[in-house]
Amino acid sequence: MNYIELKIDGGLQKINTRDILYIQALGNYAKVVCRSRSMLSLITLRELEEMLGTGFLRIHKSFIVNTYAIEEKTRAMVVIKDRELPIGKTYKNSVHQLMSM
């Protein structure tokens, strides 16, 4: 799937998944950070995880990242567009296994 539909500002918007850099949980909302803009949607990360499929990786209870957007990776974080995103303890093993392939 090349896009997802999210409810944003009271309407449905198609978002090209290739434009998504990362997604951050903010309570019951998700902040979707794209190359050119950011937006909030009333949706959980679990729901988004199911919609996104391959190319996206849960690295923390609050973050899903586009693996193609990762510029740098250490044992504790990934860097996307100068933003350091933490890798959670629960996700460390799976993140490092997938990223070392």
Image (tube, rainbow, N blue to C red):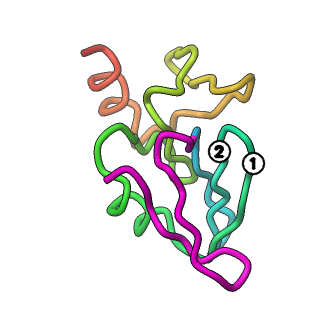
Looking at the image, which residue sits at the far bottom? 10
Whether tag 2 and tag 1 are in contact, CB under 8 A, the answer is yes
Image vertical order of residue 6 relative to residue 58, above or below: below
- Mark 2 Cα-neighbour bin, 10 Å: few <14, some 14–19, many ≥20: some
Query: Which percent across, then down, holds residue 99?
Result: 35, 21
Secondary structure mostly seen in magenta is strand
Q: Quadrant of the C terminus?
A: top left
Residue under the point 44% across and 62% down: 4
Q: Which mark is residue 37?
A: 1
Residue 90 drawn at (x, y percent): 40, 43
At 69% from the left and 28% from the top, the residue drawn is 84
Q: Nearer the viewer, residue 88 or 64?
A: 64
Q: Residue at horizontal 36%, vertical 62%?
A: 51
Whether residue 59 appears in magenta in the rendering, the answer is no
> In x, y percent, where is residue 35?
67, 38
Q: How many marks?
A: 2
From the viewer's perspective, tell me whether residue 1 is left or right of residue 37. left
Dot 1, how many residues are within 10 Å of its Cα: few (below 14), some (14-19), or many (20+)?
few
In front of the other: 69 or 59:
69
Amino acid at dot 1: Arg
Quarter residue 34 falls in? top right
Q: Residue at label 2?
A: 34
Which residue is found at the position 60% from the left and 34% from the top?
86
Badge number at residue 70: none
Magenta-drawn segment: 1-20
Residue 16, magenta (yes or no): yes
Quick one: SS at disc 2?
strand
Occupied quadrant, residue 28: bottom right
Q: Is residue 8 left or right of residue 21?
A: right
